[in-house]
Image (cartoon, rainbow, N blue to C red):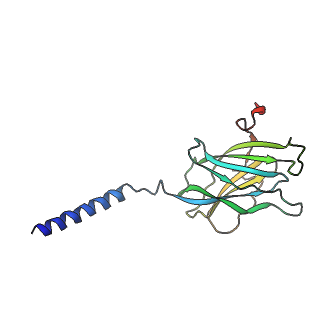
Amino acid sequence: MSEIRWKDIFALFVVVVLLASIGGCSDQDDSSPADVGGFNYTNYYIAQFDVANEDQSMSAAGPNIFPKDANEARSGGGASVCCISIPSHWRPGMRLVVTWRRDTHPYDDKDRSGDQWLTATTDVPPYGPNTDGFWVHFLPGDRIRVQVQDTPAWPDKPDEHDRYIVQGVPDPQHNPEAH
């Protein structure tokens, strides 16, 4: 009889633990890891870029990206850095801060005047239930657009009138002389 009681108590304990763990789960906070990559549609070198949420509690870095060749639409896309945590479900109001170092004279060791850090805060565009990658599109005029890719196909260049394209500005934290 005492053997049955211990089995019953153990079974009840397992059920309580399982129910407690299920009750604590919420897909609202679920996230998926994704590699960080970028596409460069400019004639300057992206020496480094970082992506973070506004309070800087989450951050990730991306690879450097060479300038696009004259006969190419873009460069990049071939390298990525692991990882950024992407919420499983898009929500309005999701914002990111992208900081990047661009060099407008990448092949001139004597002229460093084009080496500058820029920053932009952007809304995250809506995305579907899959997370197949995270991209930053570097556009002419020191503009960027972020993209959570929800299909395995390569992303297209954003339309010039895309409402999620934002303007970068000199970053005072990384460019003390810009104050």
Q: Nearer the viewer, residue 54 or 59?
A: 59
Q: Quadrant of residue 133?
A: bottom right
Quadrant in which residue 83 is drawn: bottom right
Determine the image quadrant of residue 19: bottom left
18 left or right of 51? left
Is 33 positioned to the left or the right of 163 in the image? left
Which residue in the rendered view is the most extreme toward the front? Answer: 109
Q: Position of residue 128 (x, y in %)?
A: 58, 62
Q: Residue at x 66, y 52 (%)?
A: 61
Provide residue 135's location: percent of width, then percent of height.
68, 57
- Quadrant where the N terminus sits is bottom left
Residue 129 drawn above or below residue 106: below
Query: What residue sits 14% from the left and 65% below the top?
Result: 5
Residue 138 location (% of width, % of height): 76, 53
Q: Residue furthest top?
A: 179
Q: Residue at x 35, y 58 (%)?
A: 21
| Number of marks in the rendered image | 0
Which x, y percent locates residue 77?
73, 62
Looking at this view, is 8 or 148 the one in front? Answer: 8
Q: Quadrant of the C terminus?
A: top right
